Image (cartoon, rainbow, N blue to C red):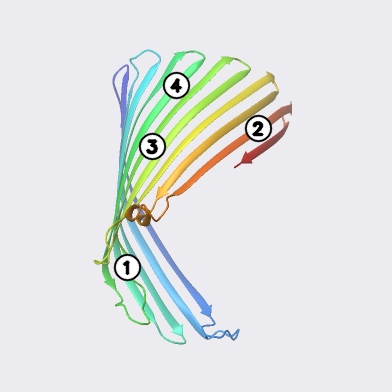
Amino acid sequence: LLMSPLKYLSASAKIKAGLKNRFSDSNTPLDSTTIPEMLINSTTYVDSSDTFKSINESLEVRFTKLPRTTLYIDGDCEQVYGRRREESARVLGAGSYFFRDVDIVDYRNKITAGINWRPYNILSISSQYRRTLIDDTYDVREETPFSATNTFLDLLDAQRFNGDNFTAKADIKPYRWIHGTFKYQLKNTDIVTTSAISTLDSAKVIHYMNTYLASVTLIPTQNFYLTGMFSRQASFTDTPARLANVAVVPRYEADVNTAMGSATYIITPKASLETQYQWVH
């Protein structure tokens, strides 16, 4: 559904429904002796199936009354309802059997707001913020009891993902032969996992990342392009062990610097020559 109630205001709404079925099976021949004999003495058969039903709703709104400016906000929601059945049996050799039937519910919500601004013909600026929330829950209908030969366990009860994503970008083209881009991006995600084992507490993971990027393209002639780019990505991850004992367990940190240079020469409309060098540290 597309609506334009005003000249400078437009909105579109969408709804989508989906159904997905998957069936799979496999046979695994094994040499399960303590000291391998290079002889097959057992075979495990695995059969699994998934059924997922989904409903997706989205709404997009654009506002263009301000000079050289576009404001927008988008919302997207999805509900997924699934059922997964797994069966594993050793049909030759020492017997073992496992069966599990699980209901899976997945809620995904995403909202995005941003602005595109072109104050001058040579300069365009854009900025965007996105909030993401994902909730996964698992409800076991039936499962083979734990035993010495059936060591499978349903470990997850629920997972929750909270994410923030902010991006700012500027493009400048003061002359026909030069084009520059500057971009900054911030992403952070919190993941909370709830175990199906009642004696375990919920576990939280924090991931945080900053990315800075600058690139310049030169066009000295109509058929010759030179591009240089540099980016720096700084991130860290805090695990449950780190959050529980800051003094002992260090956080995982990763700093990645990337530089790239390329040259392209258009020989004819059907042939071109390109060379590229990339350095990552």
**Separation of disc 2 and disc 1 at Cα?**
50 Å
Tell me which amino acid carries mark 2: Gly
Residue to which mark 3 is pinned: 165
Count every numbered label the image shows and give the total: 4
Q: Which residue, given by chain and number where applicable, does mark 4 sit on?
A: 125
Q: What SS does tag 3 mark?
A: strand
Q: Which residue is mark 2?
A: 261
Q: Quadrant of residue 99?
A: bottom left
Which residue is pictured at 56% across the width and 38% down the height? Answer: 257
Which mark is nearer the camera, 2 or 1? 2
* Cα–Cα span, label 4 and label 3: 17 Å
Query: Can residue 268 be seen in this snapshot?
Result: no
Q: Amino acid at mark 4?
A: Ile
How crowded pointer 4 is (Cα within 10 Å; few <14, some 14-19, many 20+) is rated as some
- The residues tagged by marks 3 and 2 sit, at their Cα atoms, a distance apart of 28 Å
Mark in front: 2 vs 4: 2
Binning the other alpha carbons within 10 Å of mark 1 as few (below 14), some (14 to 19) or many (20 upward) gives: some
The C terminus, quarter of image: top right
| Whether residue 186 can be seen here | yes
Decide: marks 1, 3 in contact (CB < 8 A)? no
